[in-house]
Amino acid sequence: MIKKIILGVALAGISNTYAQQGTASPYSYYGFGEKHFKGSNEIKSMGSLAVFTDSLHINTLNPASYSKLQATTFSLGASYKSTDLSNANSKEKTTSGSFDYLTMAFPAGDFRVAVGIMPYSFVGYNIQNTSINDKGMTQANQLIGEGGLNRTFLGLSYKINKNFSIGVDGAYIFGDTETSAITFITDNGEGVPLDRGSRLRKKNNYSGLAVNAGLNFEQPLNNKLSLFATATFSPEMKLKNDQESILATVKADSNLGFVEIDSRTTTDYDEKMLLPMNYSIGAGIGNHLKWFVGAEYTATQTSKYNNFYKYENARYNDYMKIGLGGFYTPKYNSFESYFEKISYRAGVNYENTGLVINNQEIKGYNANIGIGLPVPFSKTMMSNSNINIGFEYGQKGNTNMGLIKENYYGVHVGFSFSDVWFKRRKFN
């Protein structure tokens, strides 16, 4: 019975879904949940490109970029998003917010070292629908999910020569999710329990390692113009999943909750779940002190998820994303105008998530603008630290075949502080 629940048959009941979670998307029902962008907020404002690197910001998309950093750099970020969910019959609004990253990088001789922690994925949905079962009775279904995975990493970068840098991140992925599927027979088709129902609750505990390697290339074309290129690669790896499944008979209580009458628990330790192979290539051109424009292509072999996840109405193709973006800084060292030192950023990207539901590919696009504000706020002082503020608008999915379309608006804020630490000082 539970296997026949189809996501997106009806939107009714998607209400106030986990504002404390990093997502309120019904598509986080699938796989590990909704993948979280693992770059900094200033990079997100430029179309989520890994190709651009500078000496003031930690670009966690490409570990080779750390070699550009000249001082100890500390960064953190957070975001907030409002999402309108709609299908052919109804609409709902949800909100979500998240801590995005906490990272630090510093010179260590000829190397650069980076450490940090950030979300890897989020699960956050509350979906209710009704259907007619094979006995002609109205059946109410509810799917609930919460939790997510985190990523903590240690990275190392080395500058081979004036043009080439290489780097690698080793990450530990860990976290918990809990999902529930509840089924009741109703007497009026409006979700009022007629008698007892069933609930299947799954508790997942994930852990494992991931690797991301990067190559960075920069070639000056003249005194003011440079060519940038980058490539990253993450090999296929697997996570361990300790899963506990609890199948119970439940009865509604007076507080609109559920009381377990009897239950049966099964455990599956050391189950393996896939982290698919991923790569990106990008190129751009510009003056790193004044302007830059670039493009990037990212692909993930998500079609291999089909060997691990079985859905009656869904499957996976490979993921792909194309991004375009850049920035402009009128005069980074201006002593006359603070506004000339502000960096203005913009970018767009298009993605095919690889997820196919009811034979409909789930695609989306995203547009961002942002500014980088030097700190301190002074016309006459130079600063290696800044506050980065960005705004985004995006869309994912469609309303065909009973599916759900997401229109979302978001704001993200990042802080980047750079100073010289660990330097041996000499006294006369």
Image (tube, helix red, strand yellow):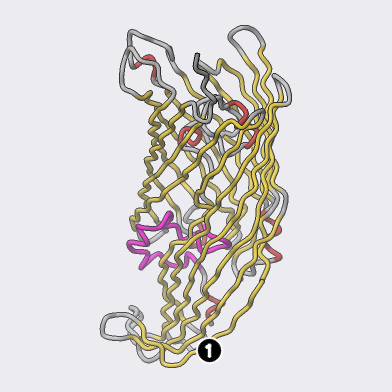
- Residue 306's quadrant in the figure? bottom right
Q: In front: 390, or 297?
A: 390
| 382 within the magenta span | no
Which residue is found at the position 40% from the left and 16% from the top? 382
Q: Could you say where residue 391 lies in the image, as x and y percent from the top left? A: 39, 36
Can residue 65 be seen here? The reply is no
Label 1 SS:
strand
Q: What is the crowding at mark 1: few (fewer than 14 residues within 10 Å), some, or many (at least 20)? A: few
Q: In front: 73, or 411?
A: 73
Q: In front: 74, or 362?
A: 74
Give the magenta-colored segment's residue range: 7-33
Q: Main secondary structure of the magenta part?
A: loop
Figure check: 274 above or below 62: below
- Residue 110's quadrant in the figure? top right
Can residue 105 be seen here? The reply is yes
Query: Furthest-front residue in view?
Result: 428
Query: Furthest-left residue in view?
Result: 254
Figure check: 412 above or below 147: above
Q: Which amino acid lies under the numbered mark 1 shown in the image of this protein? A: Arg
Q: In front: 191, or 387?
A: 387
Q: Could you say where residue 410 lies in the image, as x and y percent from the top left? A: 38, 43
Which residue is found at the position 66% from the left and 64% from the top? 273
Which residue is found at the position 38% from the left and 51% from the top? 97
Left or right, 46 with reference to 223: left
Residue at image mark 1: 264
Left or right, 136 with reference to 376: right
